Amino acid sequence: MTKYWIAVASAEHARRGKAGFMQVNHGKKTPLQRIRAGDGVTYYSPAETIRGKDRLQSFTTIGSVRDEELYQGEMGGDFTPWRRNVDYADAIEAPIAPLLDTLDFTRGNRNWGYQMRLGLFEISEHDFRAIAEAMHAEV
């Protein structure tokens, strides 16, 4: 059964992943083990840069998980974050504000941003499709 996910990262980091991978929670393995081939994933970026004050609050990338492979990437030094392969769709970045009354996880929820702190969470197919439409993406 296909699941849909929001991963949270700065836009700078999410855009790097467009090379064909995703990583979450500073490269931790455990969250990525919940994801399966064919699952849909979109990145929400609260800011342009990590720990940035440059608010963006937009969905920055969207795609589907390519396979079941879970591997460690090479980032230099001792940092080898866990990753999953993702086929990203051609898409434009879309602010979340116009979708707040449409998405299941935000509608009527003044504290919708709280769950973003988890770094990765499951959303409904409805929400994924609404985000994809806002991003002009075919996924």
Image (cartoon, rainbow, N blue to C red):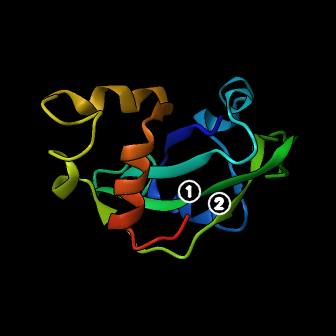
Q: In the shown orientation, is residue 55 left or right of residue 89? A: left
Mark 2: give few (<14), some (14-19) or many (20+) Cα within 10 Å. Answer: many
Camera-nearest residue between 106 and 10: 106
Q: Which residue is mark 2?
A: 17
The circle drawn on residue 50 is none
Which of the 4 image quadrants contains residue 95? Answer: bottom left
Q: Amino acid at mark 1?
A: His
Q: Residue at x 40, y 28 (%)?
A: 117
Q: Decide: marks 2, 1 in contact (CB < 8 A)? A: yes
Query: Residue 129 at x, y = what percent?
Result: 41, 54
Q: Amino acid at mark 2?
A: Gly
State which mark lies toward you, 2 or 1. Answer: 2
Which of the 4 image quadrants contains residue 87? Answer: bottom right
Query: Residue 75 at x, y = what percent?
Result: 79, 52
Camera-nearest residue between 130 and 77: 130
Residue 82, above or below 129 = above
The circle drawn on residue 13 is 1
Q: Residue at x 52, y 40 (%)?
A: 5
Camera-nearest residue between 72 and 137: 137
Mark 1: give few (<14), some (14-19) or many (20+) Cα within 10 Å. Answer: some
Q: In the shown orientation, is residue 53 left or right of residue 19? A: left
Mark 1 residue element:
helix
Q: From where the camera sits, is residue 48 visible?
A: no
Q: In the shown orientation, is residue 130 left or right of residue 1? A: left
Q: Residue at x 68, y 34 (%)?
A: 35
Residue 104, above or below 85 = above
